[in-house]
Image (cartoon, coloured by chain):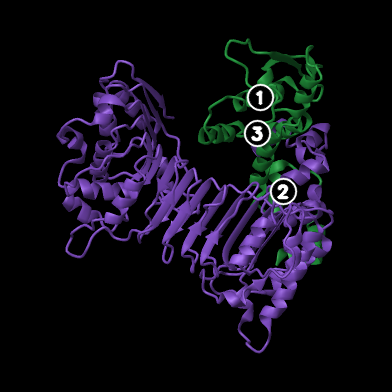
Chain colours: A green, B purple
Amino acid sequence: MSSSSSSSSPSCPKKMITLKSSDGETFEIEEIAALQSKTLESMIDENCASTPVPLPNITGKILAKVVEYCTKHAEVGADAESLRAWDAEFVSVDHPTLFDYILAANFLEIPTLLNLACQSVADMVKGKTPDEIHKIFNIKSTFTPEEEEELRRENQWAFD
Amino acid sequence: MSEAMRITDGGSDPRKSKEDEVVDRISGLPDSLLLHILSFLPFRCAVRASLILRPFRGLWRSLSSLSFEECDFHACRRGRSGAGEFLNFVEHVLALHESPKIHTFRIELNFHASGFPNPEFDGRGVMSNRLDEWICFALKKKVKVLDVALGGCARPMGAKPALHYRVPSAVLGSSNLVELKLKVCNIESLGQIHLKSLQKLSMFDVNLSEEVIQNLVSGSPSLKKVSLQYCHGLQVLKFERHPSLEELNVCNCVDLEKVDLASSGIKILAVYVGYPLSKIICPNVMTLELDGLQDDVNLDCGSSLNDVALYVSGFGDFLLERGVFLEYYEFKRLLKKLRSIAHFTLCNRSILVFSIWELNNQTCPSFNWKSVTMTLNLAKWHLPGISYLLEACDFLETLTIYVYPSNPEDIQRNTWDRACNFDGRSYWHSVQGTFHCLAHHLKNVMVYACVTEPYVIELIEFLLGNALVLEKMVISTKRNSKENRNGILYLADTSGLEKDYTSDMLLDFSQKVLSLPRISPRAVVHMAVC
C-alpha cells in the first residue's frame, strides 16, 4: 500500500473522505483506507477531496464493498493468514459482482483488489472446456463449433 | 450461479433482449483487463484460452510472463528432453509474441536428457543452440526475471557439472535483469560481468568458481540476496564489502569448506551445514539460520548476532541400536556458544534433543535467551524438552509455540513411547520445583496453529498457573511457513488435517482456556480462534 502520510498519532481525529456513487449514495471512508486507491491518493495530495468525490461509474452497492475492502486492508497488525481468508470470502460473490469489482478497482486504481478479483475469474476459467467457460460466464460472442475446430487446427502447436 | 443468471435474464424467452447482453460481462471488459485476467492463468492455459475464446482473442501475444515447462508435455520419468511438441510450442510462442517487453521468462526442461539416446548425435549441442536463441529472445525483450531450470524432472545432482549448459555471456551483461535463477548450468566468466539492476541471484547445481562468484557479486551493484544450493567448484566462499548485499543462503555446496563473511556487510545468513563445511566466520551477521549440523561446525559470530534459528535436519535417528539415545555433545557446545542471543528459534528435532537431555537428567546449562519460538509436531515426548528449555532459560520473556499434529509416520514413535512412560496429560503436574523464568521474567506467551491438539491445553494451564509476571497470552489459529530460508521443509506435512478443527471444538477450547486460573493478576488472554 502506498501512503503519502505517515500513520497519525492516536490522539488525532481520523480524517474522512466522502465518496458519492452513481446512484447518489454517499459513503465515508478514512483517509488512510482511501490511500489504497491511487486515484483517490492523488486527489488527496492535490487537495481535491474535501467535497464529496463523485464516482459516476460505480453503484452504491459496489462502492459500499470497495470501502469495506480498503478499510480492512488499511488495518494495522492484521496477519497475512487471516487477511487471505477474509479476501477469499470477499470474492465469493456472483459473477456480475466480481466483474463490478474488477471495473471499480481498475477505475480507482486499487491493484490489490484488481489482482484478487482477476485471480478469482482466472481460477474459474482454469481447467474448464470452452463450452463450460461460455456457460459459466454466459459469454454471448463465441466461435461456432466449426470455427473453433478450424482455430484448433491452425494452432495445432498450442493444443498438442 | 448460472442458474440464477438464467432466471433473471428470462431464460426461456427466445428474443435477444438487452438483458442478455448485460449479463455477458466478459465480452464488455476492455482488452487491458482481459489481458490482466489472462495473466493469472498458467501460461499454456492462457495461450489456449486466448486462441479459442473469442473475447480473449489475440491477447496472449501481449502477455509479459512467459513460462515453458517440458513436464507439461510428457509423462514424467519416461519423457525425453526435446520432445517435439514442447519445442514446437516454444518456437511458435517466440515467433508470434508481440510486446516489445516482457517481465518474466521461465524455461524448465531436462537438458542432460537431450544427450540420449543417440550418443553420436550431439543432442546437447543442438539443445544448447536452442537455449541460446531462446535466452537471446528474452534479453532482447528486456526481461527482468530470468529463470533457467535445466534439471527437469530428473533426479537432482545426477549429471556431470562439466557437461552442463553454458549460460551465454550476454546474460551476464544485461542491465534489465532484476532476478536471475539458474539451475543445472555452467557459468564461465569470459567477459565483463555487469548486472546493474540485479537484486536476487539464485543458483542450484551450478558449476562455478571462486573467481566467478567474486565477479558476479562485484559486477552487481544492486545485489541484495544470493542463494547457492548444491553448487560445485567453491572451496571457500568469501565476500568483500558491497553496497547492498544483505542476505546469503548456502546449502550443501559439495566442495565448500569455509564461509568467510568477515569483510562483508551481509546481515542475514542461512547455511545448511554439511560435509565438508566446517568453518563459518560471520562477525557482522545479525540473523543466522543453521540447518543440517550432522557434523561439528566452527562458528565465529559477533556481538551483532541477535536472532538465531536452529534446524537439525541433519540429525538422523535419535538413537543407537540398543535403544540408547545419542548424546549430542557438539550440539550442546554450539548452544552454549550461542547462549547470549536474544531471539532463538527451534524446530521439532532440537526440542527432542532437549527431551533426551532431560530424560537423561543432564545438568542444565544456562542460556540468556529472551525470546524463543518453536514449531512442533507436538507429541508427548516433546514435553520434557519444553521443560528443559524453561529450566535453561532463566531470563525468558517471550515464548511462542506453533503447534502442528504429531507425525503419525514417525518411525521412532515406539522408542520414544517407551522412553517416556508418563501420562502426557498430567506431565506438568509431576514437574518438580519452580522455573526461574516463570517466577520472574515470562511476560508474553503465544500459542498458534493447531491449538486444539493434545497437550496444548495442559501446557497453557501450567503456564497460566505458574507465570507470576505474565502480561499477555495470545492464542490463535494462524500458521507459519513450513519452509526455512533454504527452502527446506522442516515440518511433517499437515495440510490434509486442516479440516479437523470444527468451530464447535474451537469454541469449546476457547471457553476452557478462558476459565483456567491465572496466577498473574495482570495476565490478559487474547483468543483469535475461528
Q: Is residue A143 above or below residue B234?
A: above
Counting from the top left corner in percent of width and height, residue A11 is at 58, 10
Label 2: which secondary element: loop
Q: Measure the alpha-carbon separation of dots 1 and 3.
A: 14 Å
Residue A135 at what x, y percent from top left?
Answer: 70, 45
Q: Is residue B117 above or below residue A46?
A: below
The subunit letter for the residue under badge 1 reads A
Q: Are marks 1 and 3 on the same chain?
A: yes
The residue to which callout 3 is attached is A94
Label 3 lies in what chain?
A: A
The residue under label 1 is A65
Which residue is identified by label 2?
B39
Q: Is residue B338 left or right of residue B170?
A: left
State the SS at label 1: helix
Discs 2 and 1 lie in a common subunit = no
Q: Amino acid at mark 1?
A: Lys
